[in-house]
Image (tube, helix red, strand yellow):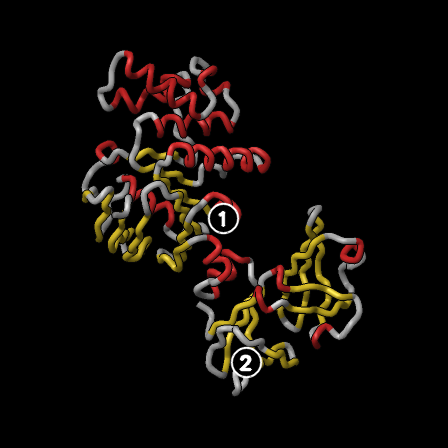
């Protein structure tokens, strides 16, 4: 039995469908990330799971029990909000204890459970500190401790790292994953950051315009995106319109014919879309480049890797290569030849 099950869960705001009827199954102990761009409905879906929004349709099951009509405090769910929602006039201890006292836990049990929760996030030494005196990362850990202290059956995160700087974000997301693994709590995590979802989650659900486009393990979604949106949003693929030949063994794009290797999933002859991931392209200053030529539009050096923007025909493609002395010589304005690794490309019958 799934720890969390959504069946046809939907939410409208007036005539706007924020979440279309959605099914979702999350196993016990699983870390599940809901990924999508701003406004896709992922936070609304999370709030319906937590009881902060009432669905207009469908059912939410937790541990096999229908919790659709229960309030947040009746569900046994811990929630970490984007802005942490801590009380600035309270100490760390009092913030973490708040949920227990709201559930009528009293006496030594409060202290024992609060200190246990703070120990799990390595903040027990700061239990008497005022919240404003903490760093952003420490405040985030207090919010996690407050969610853990009620011993939830399910833990929800709503973009908890968006207010942190890059270095702290990387450190904190590692702490969240280690904490989730050590506690084994089923976790649902909302983010718009593809790297965050890929590094944290056992499974990812990609949303767009209120719909769940694809769900599964990160390696599956990245390696076999269901449509052009998932390929572009999750994999950073460049999308180009092309024409599949009658024998379905070649395509025409940018004035050249490209041979499609065996083993590719090829749509019927006619108009199609080729999704080219950044790692599929390699650059050569000279050479025939399999008939593809491009002009370097941009170059972004990030240390181990370099990202190039390449104008090929009327499309700008993105190429991600390992930084080498050779790649360091490639500069904007240069003409280059392109080679394409089909293992990192996908063909679709249309954009969707």
| Label 1–label 2 contact, CB within 8 A | no
Question: x and y percent of residue 322 in the render?
Answer: 70, 54
Dot 2: few (<14), some (14–19), or many (≥20) neighbours within 10 Å? some
Q: Earlier in the sequence, mark 1 or mark 2?
A: 1
Dot in front, 1 or 2: 1
Between 294 and 180, the one nearer to me in the picture? 180
Q: Secondary structure at mark 1?
A: helix
Residue under the image location 49 percent in, 76 percent down? 266
Query: Residue 198 shows which numbered tag?
Result: 1
**The C terminus: image quadrant:** bottom left
Q: CA distance from mark 1 to mark 2?
A: 32 Å
Residue under the image location 77 percent in, 68 percent down? 335
Between 213 and 115, the one nearer to me in the picture? 115
Residue under the image location 22 percent in, 20 percent down? 104
- Asked if residue 163 shows in the view, the reply is no
Residue under the image location 65 percent in, 60 percent down? 319
Q: Secondary structure at mark 2?
A: strand
- The residue carrying mark 2 is 243
- Asked if residue 189 shows in the view, the reply is yes
On the image, which quarter does residue 159 sit in? Answer: top left
Q: Is residue 76 above or below residue 287?
A: above
Question: x and y percent of residue 42 in the render?
Answer: 38, 49
How many badges with numbers are in the image? 2
Q: Is residue 238 left or right of residue 27?
A: right
Q: Is residue 19 left or right of residue 243?
A: left
Question: x and y percent of residue 21 in the render?
Answer: 27, 57
Q: Is residue 159 left or right of residue 25?
A: right
């Amino acid at each position: 039995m799934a720890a969390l099950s959504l069946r046809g869960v939907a939410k409208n705001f007036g005539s706007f469908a924020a979440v279309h009827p959605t099914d979702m199954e999350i196993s016990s102990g699983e870390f599940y990330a809901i990924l999508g761009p701003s406004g896709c409905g992922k936070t609304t879906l999370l709030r319906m799971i937590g009881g902060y929004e009432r669905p207009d349709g469908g059912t939410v099951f937790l541990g096999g029990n229908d919790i659709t009509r229960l309030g947040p405090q009746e569900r046994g769910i811990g929630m970490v909000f984007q802005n942490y929602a801590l009380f600035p006039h309270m100490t760390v201890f009092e913030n973490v204890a708040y949920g227990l006292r709201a559930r009528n836990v009293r006496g030594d049990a409060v202290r024992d459970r609060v200190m246990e929760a703070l120990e799990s996030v390595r903040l027990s030494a700061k239990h008497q500190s005022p919240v404003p005196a903490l760093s952003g990362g420490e405040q985030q850990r207090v919010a996690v401790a407050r969610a853990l202290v009620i011993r939830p059956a399910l833990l929800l995160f709503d973009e908890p790292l968006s207010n942190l700087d890059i270095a702290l974000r990387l450190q904190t997301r590692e702490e969240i994953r280690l904490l989730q693994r050590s506690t084994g709590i089923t976790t649902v995590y909302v983010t718009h950051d593809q790297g965050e979802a890929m590094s944290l989650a056992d499974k990812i659900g990609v949303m767009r315009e209120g719909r769940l486009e694809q769900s599964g393990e990160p390696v599956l979604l990245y390696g076999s995106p269901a449509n052009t949106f998932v390929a572009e949003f999750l994999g950073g693929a460049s999308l180009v319109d092309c024409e599949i030949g009658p024998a379905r063994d070649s395509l025409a794009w940018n004035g050249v014919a490209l041979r499609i290797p065996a083993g590719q999933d090829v749509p019927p002859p006619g108009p199609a879309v080729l999704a080219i991931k950044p790692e599929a392209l390699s650059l050569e200053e000279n050479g025939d480049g399999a008939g593809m030529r491009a002009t370097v539009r941009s170059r972004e050096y990030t240390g181990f890797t370099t990202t190039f923007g390449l104008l090929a025909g009327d499309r700008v493609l993105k190429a991600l290569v390992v930084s080498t002395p050779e790649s360091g010589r490639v500069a904007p304005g240069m003409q280059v030849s392109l080679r394409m690794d089909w293992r990192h490309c996908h063909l679709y019958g249309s954009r969707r």
